[in-house]
Structure formats: structure tokens, C-alpha cells
């Protein structure tokens, strides 16, 4: 056995989920339709025609799920609020029953000694807003502000940590450029404009949360960030890597932390650059308390004239290990990412708001789920987080993705990311070997090197 790498006192060990991926109860408590309900019903969009109608039935089983969190000693739980539960039509008439659900969830968490980290937008836009243009329509920013106010009004006395958006790159570009996610639009200019409106709504929400919050209120945004490396030292590949970094990372981090879009990307987007109004950049760069980093893998890029509007192609390094998502396992990238955001953007505090891996888990004859690869994946990433902390990087917590297997968007239920196994036909939860091990890490507040 190696030595124990200790984490700081009060380090927030947590797990994360998102509303559409786990809740189910899609017609319960007055919930309205979301863009994912619609997208899932569009033939060919989601693997196997899967939907989030039932998902993990967390809407009905949240007490059991809190008990599970307690069993492994989680200090924090990151979940998202389904906007269509709060405003079934996106705006206008508030649905108190929707807020009641999150009210009960928050109380249950607090009773169990678990800090709630609330994400306001994890991609389930009310369909009624999409019918009016969705995030491409600037009015949606106003609707998001009102929705934020309503949620903060109800939960703000007990919730200290707020996340405005989860992975705006995914919402903007997978939703509106590649069309792999809801609402399934494939238009670059729309995607770029959507990214601007998402960022603007982030800034507006920060202001609302501060105005309505209290001295404990902490607000941040969560971005999916990857270190981007060139496939070779050639000038072309290095430029390709820089472009992908601009597209994925800098396009979101620069405006939030520096108040401006990166010049190289504005030039690259050309006619597709967003329409920005006076005051927008100031609003977007409203001061935040933390940055949430979702880290899974690195990106290795080569120049490719045929490679879409960015003229790039991603390269899969040989001799590397890959998860079921075909994502390379590259733990050092977590350290590199934390180091980079700390150096370049100086967020006062960082959280790893998601990190985890999909593997094809099975229940053994003894009813147990052994997932040594996930355990090794998490361990190697925890060690890199520790390395960052040792170097003075202000990392305050770590949320494993995910508390339980769930609806993995366009992949449906075919990818299992959980530290808890979900047997979907019976909804039985089985803590995986990795889940038990996470419990040991939390108890020791440290990981064996
Ligand atoms: O399941 C998603 C989550 O919703 C956002 N971040 C990445 C996860 C794995 O793909």
C-alpha cells in the first residue's frame, strides 16, 4: 500500500446528476414539456428510442437516493432543477408543485448533512420557449432571469451554492451546430448566437442570485474544459489545436473572466460571429465566486481541410486506454486543466463539478457490481486533483459523475457512468465497488497514492 494523500479539511466530496437524466416523472406535478422530451420522440435522434420519461424515477425515489448518498458519506450533491417543472410554459405562470419537489429534496439533503449545489440549466429548456426560438431568441435570457429569481426566492434561504449553466458549449454547439442534442438544429450562426445568449443569461442570473441571496451565496458557472494538444509539432496542427481550444474553452472562459470574446475566434466565425449589444460583455463578466470544471478527457487535434468549419480532425493517440464513450483516459489532463484555468482566469475557487467514466458494468452472480476500471479511473484523477491542491490551486471540492447510472443523452441508457448501478426494469440501486471505494476515500479524506 502506498501513502495516503490527504485532502484539505472541509473538502467537498460529492456526486453529480442532472434533472432530465434521472428524474423521470415527466408528467408529474404539473411539469411542462422540455426540448429533450420532444427530441427523444423524434425518430433516430436517441439510441434505441430511449426517453427520460421514467429514467431513474428519482422524482419518486429521491429519499432512497439521499439515503444512498448518506451511506457513502457524501458531503455535497450537485443536481439540476428542471425549468419545465417551475414554469411549464417557460415563463408566465409559476407552478408551485415543481418548486415543492426541490424544496423537499433540499430539506432531505440538509437533514442528511449534505450540501446542495444547484444547477439552474442542465439542458432541459421548456419546449414552449423553443417554439419561440429557444436560446437563439434573446427573450429567453429574460425568461431565464425570471426563472432564476423564482428558484432562488424559494430555495435561497437554504442553498448556498448556485451554478447558472452546465457546459454551455454542449448546449450551444451540440444542440445547434452538430444537432446531436436537443433541439437538434444544425446551423453554425445559430449556435454561436445561442452561445452568446447562454453567456448573457449566466451574467444576468449571477446578478439576480446575488441580489436575492445572502452572505453565504456563492455563484459560478460550469464549463466542460479539455486540454487541447496538437497531433504533431507542425505549424498547421498547432494552429488546429489553438482553434479547437478557442472553440471549446476560450470562447466561454474569456467572456466570463475577461469580458471579451477571443479575437482569433471572432475572426474565424466571421459572418457567424454573434450579435452583441452594448453592455452585454459587462453583464457576462459579472464577478463569480467559483468556476466548475467538468473534466473527462483531453483533445488531440490535427489540421484537416475537410474537417468542418474548424478545418480540424481529432486524433486518438495509440496505446491509450479508452472508456465506453471512446474517450481517452488521461488523468494528467485534470491537473493540466486546473492549472491552466487557475493561471489564465484566476477564478477565486475551483470545483471539479464532474469527472467519471462509462464502462459496461454487469451485475455478478452474487448480486455485486465490480467496476475496477472506474475505481482506477477515479483514483488516478483524484491523485491529479491532489497534485493541483499541493501546488496551491484553490480546488474546494470534487463531484463524481455520476451518483447513479442514468440517461446519457443521445446514447440513451446504453452508457453507465454511475458509482451506483441502476437496474432500470426494477429501479433497484446497487452501490458499485467504485461507490463503496469513494465512501472510503471520503471517510479517510484521502486517497492511496
Ligand atoms: O452525462 C453528461 C452530463 O450531463 C454533462 N457532462 C458530461 C456527462 C457525460 O457525458
Image (spheres, rainbow, N blue to C red):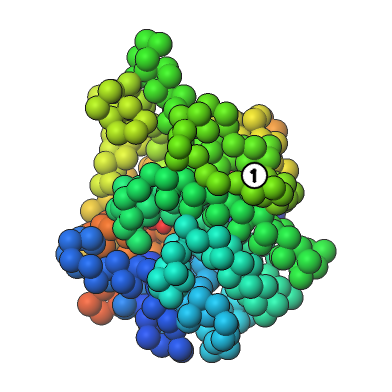
Residue 162 in percent (x, y) is at 64, 62
Pick whichever, 334 or 303, lies toward us. Answer: 303
Dot 1: element: helix
Q: Residue at x 70, y 77 (%)?
A: 153
Mark 1 closeness class: few <14, some 14–19, many ≥20 residues within 10 Å: many
Ligand 1 shows up in the quarter that is: bottom left
- Number of numbered discs: 1
Q: Residue at x 43, y 81 (%)?
A: 32
User: To which residue does mark 1 refer?
Assistant: 256
Residue 351 in percent (x, y) is at 60, 48
User: Disc 1, ligand 1: is the CB inside 8 Å?
Assistant: no
Can residue 349 be seen? no
Residue 238 in percent (x, y) is at 42, 17
Residue 387 in percent (x, y) is at 58, 33
Q: Residue at x 52, y 84 (%)?
A: 98
Pick whichever, 183 or 156, lies toward us. Answer: 183
Can residue 275 be seen? yes
Q: Residue at x 46, y 89 (%)?
A: 29
Amino acid at each position: 500500500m502506498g501513502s495516503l494523500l490527504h485532502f484539505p479539511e472541509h473538502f467537498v466530496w460529492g456526486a453529480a446528476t442532472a434533472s432530465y437524466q434521472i428524474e423521470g416523472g415527466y408528467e408529474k406535478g404539473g411539469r411542462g414539456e422540455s426540448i429533450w422530451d420532444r427530441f427523444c420522440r423524434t425518430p433516430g435522434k436517441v439510441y434505441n428510442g430511449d426517453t427520460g420519461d421514467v429514467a431513474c424515477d428519482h422524482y419518486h425515489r429521491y429519499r432512497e437516493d439521499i439515503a444512498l448518498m448518506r451511506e457513502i458519506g457524501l458531503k455535497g450533491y450537485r443536481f439540476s432543477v428542471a425549468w419545465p417543472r417551475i414554469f411549464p410554459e417557460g415563463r408566465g405562470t409559476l407552478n408551485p408543485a415543481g418548486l415543492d419537489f426541490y424544496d423537499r429534496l433540499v430539506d432531505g439533503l440538509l437533514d442528511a448533512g449534505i450540501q446542495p449545489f444547484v444547477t439552474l440549466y442542465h439542458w432541459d429548456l421548456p419546449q414552449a420557449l423553443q417554439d419561440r426560438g429557444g436560446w437563439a431568441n434573446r427573450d429567453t435570457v429574460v425568461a431565464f432571469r425570471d426563472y432564476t429569481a423564482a428558484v432562488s426566492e424559494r430555495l435561497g434561504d437554504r442553498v448556498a451554492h448556485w451554478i447558472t449553466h452546465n457546459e454551455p458549449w454542449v448546449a450551444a454547439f451540440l444542440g445547434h451546430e452538430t444537432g446531436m442534442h436537443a433541439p437538434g438544429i444544425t446551423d453554425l450562426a445559430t449556435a454561436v448566437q445561442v452561445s452568446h445568449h447562454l453567456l448573457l443569461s449566466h451574467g444576468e442570473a449571477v446578478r439576480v442570485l446575488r441580489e436575492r441571496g445572502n452572505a453565504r451565496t456563492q455563484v459560478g458557472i460550469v464549463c466542460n474544459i479539455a486540454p487541447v494538444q496538437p497531433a504533431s509539432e507542425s505549424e498547421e496542427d498547432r494552429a488546429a489545436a489553438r482553434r479547437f481550444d478557442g472553440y471549446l474553452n476560450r470562447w466561454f472562459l474569456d467572456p466570463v473572466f475577461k469580458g471579451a470574446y477571443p479575437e482569433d475566434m471572432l475572426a474565424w466565425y466571421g459572418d457567424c460571429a454573434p450579435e452583441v449589444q452594448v453592455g452585454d460583455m459587462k453583464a457576462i463578466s459579472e464577478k463569480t465566486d467559483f468556476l466548475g470544471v467538468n473534466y473527462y478527457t483531453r483533445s488531440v487535434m490535427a489540421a484537416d481541410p475537410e474537417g468542418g468549419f474548424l478545418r480540424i480532425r481529432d486524433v486518438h493517440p495509440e496505446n491509450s486506454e479508452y472508456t465506453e464513450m471512446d474517450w481517452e483516459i488521461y488523468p494528467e489532463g485534470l491537473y493540466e486543466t486546473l492549472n491552466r484555468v487557475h493561471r489564465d482566469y484566476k477564478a477565486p475557487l475551483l470545483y471539479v463539478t464532474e469527472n467519471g467514466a462509462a464502462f459496461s458494468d454487469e451485475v455478478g452472480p452474487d448480486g455485486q457490481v465490480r467496476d475496477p476500471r472506474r475505481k482506477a479511473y477515479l483514483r488516478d484523477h483524484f491523485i491529479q486533483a491532489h497534485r493541483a491542491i499541493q501546488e496551491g490551486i484553490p480546488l474546494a471540492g470534487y463531484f463524481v459523475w455520476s451518483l447513479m447510472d442514468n440517461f446519457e443523452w443521445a446514447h440513451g441508457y446504453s452508457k453507465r457512468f454511475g458509482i451506483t448501478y441502476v437496474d432500470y426494469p426494477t429501479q433497484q440501486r446497487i452501490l458499485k465497488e467504485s461507490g463503496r471505494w469513494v465512501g472510503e476515500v471520503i471517510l479517510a479524506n484521502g486517497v492511496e497514492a
